[in-house]
């Protein structure tokens, strides 16, 4: 009885979204592999899982509502917090799309590929690269590699464009850092 009362007191004092995120977070063991320096402190796994559950529950009709918001939040020039929320939202939608009909999942991938997703990653500021890597790990963890071919193509296109444009070594390193989580998972 004392333990239940203490739990109730902590739950009542906590923010509702933190209680929901903690509940969702406890139900899953991810990542199963070490980060090896591929992580960002700004990426909230609980929030990404919450977005995943919402997108899975509401299904493909939620795509037109969430996708433009996620892309605008993860666009160039956004603040670190906005980028993190955009990546959490994108990661959740991408994970949930695995439970959607295959045609709807493909449509999401096509919209991301043509909607500036690759450009948003290439324009990601240095301080948010770890957050983007966490997003990429979350989106690709325990997934069928054939369903990630669009993501691999997008990341490799970013690497090729950095090489073709004779960009700085930092741009090349950033593009390689985006490929690393996909290979690790």
Image (cartoon, rainbow, N blue to C red):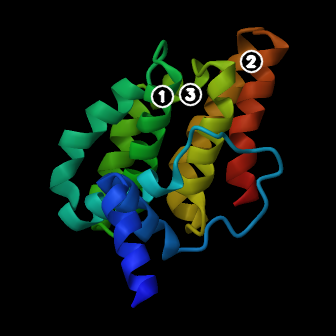
Q: Quadrant of the N terminus?
A: bottom left
**Residue 121: which disc?**
3
Picture residue at 56% right of the left edge, 28% below the top? 121
Q: Which residue is mark 2?
A: 171
Location of residue 111 in the rendering, given as x and y in whole percent from the top left corner: 33, 38
Which residue lies most toward the bottom here?
1
N-terminal label among 2 and 3: 3
Give the side of residue 102 with respect to residue 3, left or right: left
Q: Quadrant of residue 158?
A: top right
Q: Quadrant of residue 24?
A: bottom left
Judged from the image, the secondary structure of the residue bearing numbered disc 1 is: helix
- Count neighbours of disc 2 (C-alpha within 10 A) and say few if under 14, some if 14 to 19, many if 20 or more: many
N-terminal label among 3 and 1: 1
Give 31 or 173, whichever is nearer the viewer: 31
Front position among marks 2 and 1: 1
Visible in this render: residue 145?
Answer: yes
**Residue 81: which disc?**
1
Picture residue at 60% right of the left edge, 73% below the top? 29
Location of residue 154 in the rendering, given as x and y in whole percent from the top left corner: 56, 37
Q: Quadrant of residue 69?
A: top left
Judged from the image, the secondary structure of the residue bearing numbered disc 2 is: helix
Spatial CA span between label 2 and label 3: 11 Å
Give 157 or 129, whichever is nearer the viewer: 129
Looking at the image, residue 27 lies above or below residue 36: below
Visible in this render: residue 103?
Answer: no
- Count neighbours of disc 1 (C-alpha within 10 A) and say few if under 14, some if 14 to 19, many if 20 or more: some
Q: Quadrant of the C terminus?
A: bottom right
Judged from the image, the secondary structure of the residue bearing numbered disc 3 is: helix
N-terminal label among 2 and 1: 1
Spatial CA span between label 2 and label 1: 22 Å
């Amino acid at each position: 009885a004392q333990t239940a009362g203490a739990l109730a007191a902590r739950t009542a004092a906590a923010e509702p979204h933190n209680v929901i995120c903690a509940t969702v977070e406890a139900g899953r063991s991810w990542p199963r592999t070490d980060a090896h320096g591929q992580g960002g402190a700004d990426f909230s796994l609980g929030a990404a899982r919450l977005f995943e559950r919402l997108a899975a529950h509401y299904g493909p009709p939620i795509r037109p509502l969430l996708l433009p918001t996620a892309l605008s939040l993860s666009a160039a020039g956004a603040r670190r917090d906005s980028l993190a929320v955009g990546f959490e939202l994108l990661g959740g939608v991408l994970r949930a799309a695995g439970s959607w009909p295959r045609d709807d999942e493909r449509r999401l991938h096509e919209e991301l590929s043509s909607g500036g997703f690759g450009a948003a990653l290439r324009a990601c500021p240095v301080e948010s690269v770890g957050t983007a890597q966490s997003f990429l790990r979350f989106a690709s963890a325990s997934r069928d590699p054939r369903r990630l071919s669009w993501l691999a193509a997008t990341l490799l296109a970013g690497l090729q464009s950095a090489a073709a444009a004779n960009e700085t070594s930092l741009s090349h390193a950033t593009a390689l850092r985006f490929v690393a989580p996909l290979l690790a998972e």
